[in-house]
Image (tube, grey):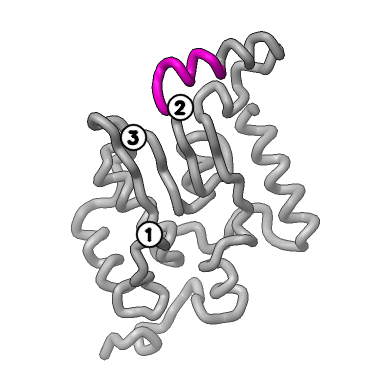
Amino acid sequence: MLKNQELEMYKQQSIRLSLPPRCPIASANYCPRYFKTVSLFRESDLIAGLDQSVEKEIEAYWKKTPFWSVLLEEEPAITKIEGEWRIIGNICPEIGYELFGIFVCFFAKYADEIDEGVAHAKLRKEKIPIDDWRWHFSSITWMHYSDCKEFSQYQAGLITPIMPKEKIGFIP
């Protein structure tokens, strides 16, 4: 799927839900999942990421909030085999779009060259366009930001884009 088509589908979902076209808290400063995804991708050399001093400051901020997840199962994660990433999960779908052109929270590459070859042969036979995600991934989980736990907390007024420092325990 072309990146612009994906964005249009995403925007249509937002319109149906009477929400902004893109996630209003998609920022390392406003969302712990976004921050953790950026941090993980930097550590894995998928992106340049944040300046390390800025990253440490933002991490310290989020760790003092109740929104810093404590369950490892909720953390954005990358599974690597022989140094190459094979699975990426629990990520911010906004970052999924920026990096891969699709709004997803989970990606899995093909297990090996054989699986990829079989899948590609099937895609060629079905005349699937080369920009379809299946040419690159064996599995994805599409996600609109309205399904994100952090966005639900934002909608409920728990996470605010301009969070007063006193609210999270900073003392001026």
Q: Nearer the viewer, residue 136 or 67?
A: 136
Residue 159, relative to residue 90: is it above or below?
below
Please rate how many residues cluster around mark 2, counting C-alpha atoms within 10 Å: few if below 14, some from 14 to 19, many from 20.
some
Question: Would you identify the image quadrant in which residue 139 lies?
Answer: top right
Element class at badge 3: strand
Image coordinates for residue 18, horizontal then vertical, percent:
77, 62
Residue 21, relative to residue 124: is it above or below?
below
Residue 110 tag number: 2
Residue type, mark 2 in image? Tyr
Residue drawn 22% across the image and 63% down it: 56
Residue drawn 69% across the image and 33% down it: 5
Of pointers 1 and 3, the one earlier in the residue sequence: 1
What residue is pinned by disc 1? 75
Q: Are marks 1 and 3 in contact (CB under 8 Å)?
A: no
Locate the N terminus by quadrant. Answer: top right
Image coordinates for residue 74, horizontal then vertical, percent:
42, 62
The overriding secondary structure of the stretch rendered in magenta is helix
Residue 81, relative to residue 44: is it above or below?
above
